[in-house]
Each structure stands twice: as structure tokens, then as C-alpha cells.
Image: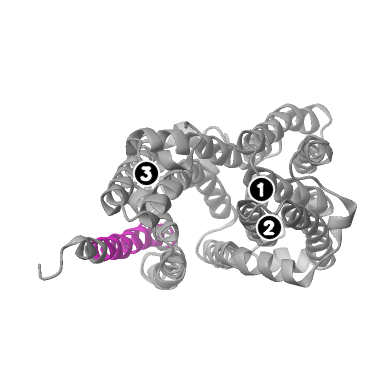
Amino acid sequence: MNNSPHILGEAPIGKLLVQYSLPSIIAMTVTSLYNIIDSVFIGHGVGAMAISGLAITFPLMNLLIAFCTLVGVGGATIASIRLGQKDKDGAEDIAGNVFVLCIINAVFYGGLALLFLDDILRFFGASDATLPYARDFMQIILLGAPISYLMVGLNNVMRSTGYPKKAMLSSLVSVACNVVIAPVFIFVFGWGIRGAATATIVSQAITLIWIMSHFLNKNTYVRLKRKSMKLKKRIIKNIFSIGMSPFAMNVCACCIVIFINHQLQAYGDDYSIGAFGIVNRIQMVFVMIIMGIAQGMQPIASYNYGAGQITRVFRALRMGVIAGCIISSTGFIFGVFFPEMFVGAFTTDAILTERSVHALQISVLAFPIVGAQIIICQFFQSIGKAGIAIFLSLSRQLLFLLPGLMLLPLFLDLWGVWWSMPVSDVLSAAVSICMAFYQMRKMHARLQPAGH
């Protein structure tokens, strides 16, 4: 009974939230650590301008993730649905199509980006000082794109076809390898920022071997078979339709980061872009933990919403929001009162440290309510309100952050870029909270007997 989905409608919400959130939190934290490791080793092993060069690559990396999730998330969801329908062959067809599409997407995206790499990086805000570092890093990452895509895509399918712990272990293996390999390539071999990128791809290649051994194992329920790798129009359409939502969000994030880099270059300099890179990595640790809580809340809210147990849905949302706000408030405390502790992990450069400390202190000012915004977005996704969820996810970037980035620097110069972040957080959180209360009132009204 412990593995029965019926416990979602019977067990205490708090216990369920811990049980379901913990694996997701670990996986999400591992993902954020993956990015932080590169930044830390690059900052100490190469220098301040290398950190700025790495920050320039963020939009390109977001696009890399966008094309990856387009296939990985869509394929994982469809494969899970096929298994729910007792269609094992259909799930294997999905896995085979994900394998082929990952390679096609990686070659298309990687090849196109490599062809115009310098022009793209210049457009993203690279200067003469940061371009060589950004170029050296992205050349390796793009050449290894097929490995990255296959690792992420197939790991998603592994998770959705009944092996969540194994998928989590894959992420841990990748990070562990990177922690060991990166300092060797950077400090011992002296490969600099190329060493960091190479360590990333080598770590992913080792993990991919582990994942492939799973799908080729005769004892694995959903396996990779040659006959399943024939692309089918219907499967491709289904994968892309489901993967389009996270794809659009990542593309939007890419566009916003490009604009941030341009504003930082216009009102600041390369050090300001480097500061954004450090602040982004620090914030992402707390955001990823909250995302883990949100993912843990999702099946609890979904099941009870479907079962008509609205009181349990409210309880799941409330506990999710409280947990999320505790984590984001922790980020606020550390960011405002102990910024040097975090920034010091990335760099010892005096100018970059000063810029990063001030940027971090401002950008986390609205963090105590950021947790609520993230949880509420996932809540609407959980109850089938995908349109509202997408609107709330994009509202921060498009409705509030983008106008703030355009207007506030006109009055506050460089400080305006940093202040636009907490302002947009406050406004987007307010909209999310209002929509959550409205939705709860609608759901509560359905519980009332007719005539009341």
C-alpha cells in the first residue's frame, strides 16, 4: 500500500509533501550545483573576466536547455501516459524517438550556433575582453551537445518510466564526476575555461554510458530497440506539443538575459555582467530547492483535485507556499546579511566582489515572497490550468522585468538594472497570490450546497 497512489488522498499532507519533495529537491539542487561548480572553478582558476565571459553564455545555454526540454520533457510525459495505458511497445517507441530527436536537435542547434558563434556572443553582449572566454567555453559545450541532449532526454524518460531513484542517481554521478574532473583539467592541465567545459561534457558522457546501460539491459521494462528508433509523425507531434511550454519559457528567459546583459554593458561594464553571473548562480540554488518542493506538491494537489477533495488541495497549496517562503526567506537573509560569504566562493577579485555583493543584496530584497510565486505557478499546472500557469511564469519576465529594465536605469543608471529584479518579483508575486485566492474561492464555492 505504501506505493499505491491512493495514499495521496489519505496520508497526512505534510508527510506526503516531504516524501514527494525530497527526491525532487535533491535532483534540482544537483542541477544548480552543476552550474555553480563551473563558475567557482573558473572564477578561481581563470579570473574575473572569465566569470563575465561565462555570464555572456547564459542565453545560449538557455537555448540549449530549451531545445533539450522540448524533446526530453515531452517524451517523458508521453512515455508515462503510454505506460498508464499498459502500452509497453508505445512507450518504447517514445524512448526510441526521443533518442533520435535528441541527436537531430543537438546537431542542428550545435552546428548552427557554432557557425555563427562570434556574432551570437557579440549580440548577447560580449566585449573584446570577454569574447575569447565565452567562445572557448561554448565551442566545447556545443561540440558535446549530442552527449548533453541524450543524457538529459533519456534521463527524463528513465524517471518517467518507473526509475526515479535511478534517474536521481544519474544526476548525482554527473555532478560527482564534474567535481573531480574540473579542477584537474583547469588547475593541473592548465586548460582554463576550456577545461571547465570539457569536464562538463566528459562527466555527462560517463553518465550517458550509465543511462544507456539501463536502456539496453534485458531486465529493464522499457528498453531502447532499433525498431523503435524509426521516427513517427504522430509521436513527434505529441512530444513537441507537450514540450512546447517549457521550451517557450526557456526561450523567454534567454531573451531576458540578453537584454539584462546589454543593459549591464550600457550602464556598467564587464564586471557588472560578471556580477550578474554570480548573483544568478547564487539565487538559482534557492529557486531550485523551491522548484523541488513545487514538484513534490504537484502529484498531491493533482490527485486530490481529481478526487474532489478540495480541502486537501487547499492544505497542499498552503503547506507548499509556507515551505517555499521559508526557503526563499533563507535566501533573503543570507543574501542581504552575509553576501560576502557567497560571493567569495566565486571570486577573490576586489572589483567583481564589490559589484556582486551590492547586486546580490538588492536582487534578493523581495525573496521572502518569491517562494509563494513559484509554488502557485506549479499549483495551477497541477490542477490543469496550464494557461494560467504559463501566464504567471512569463509575467515576471515579460510584464514586469522587461519594462523595469527599460525604465529604471533611465533614472537610477546601473542601480536601476538591479532594482528592476526585486520590483518585478513583488509585482509578479502579488498577481500570483491574487489569482490563487480567486481560484480557491471558486473551488470553495463548489463545495457549498445549492442555495447557500
Q: Are marks 2 and 3 in contact (CB under 8 Å)?
A: no
Identity, as a three-letter code, of the amino acid under mark 2: Gly
Q: Are marks 2 and 1 in contact (CB under 8 Å)?
A: yes
**How many labels, in total?**
3
Identity, as a three-letter code, of the amino acid under mark 1: Asn
Q: Position of residue 236 (x, y in %)?
A: 73, 68
Which residue does the image show at 82% across and 36% down from the upper left?
217
Nearest-to-viewer mark from 2 and 3? 3
Question: Disc 2 to disc 1, how far (Cα)?
Answer: 8 Å
Q: Are marks 3 and 1 in contact (CB under 8 Å)?
A: no
Question: Residue 75 — which label?
Answer: 2
Q: Which residue is mark 3?
A: 9
Q: Is residue 39 magenta?
A: no
First along the sequence among labels 2 and 3: 3
The quarter of the picture where residue 432 lies is: bottom left
**Quick check: can you spot residue 338?**
no
Q: Is residue 439 magenta?
A: yes
Start-end of magenta stretch:
417-440
The image shows residue 328, relative to residue 230, as above or below, that is above
The image shows residue 204, relative to residue 274, as above or below, that is above
Which residue does the image show at 28% across and 54% down from the upper left?
310
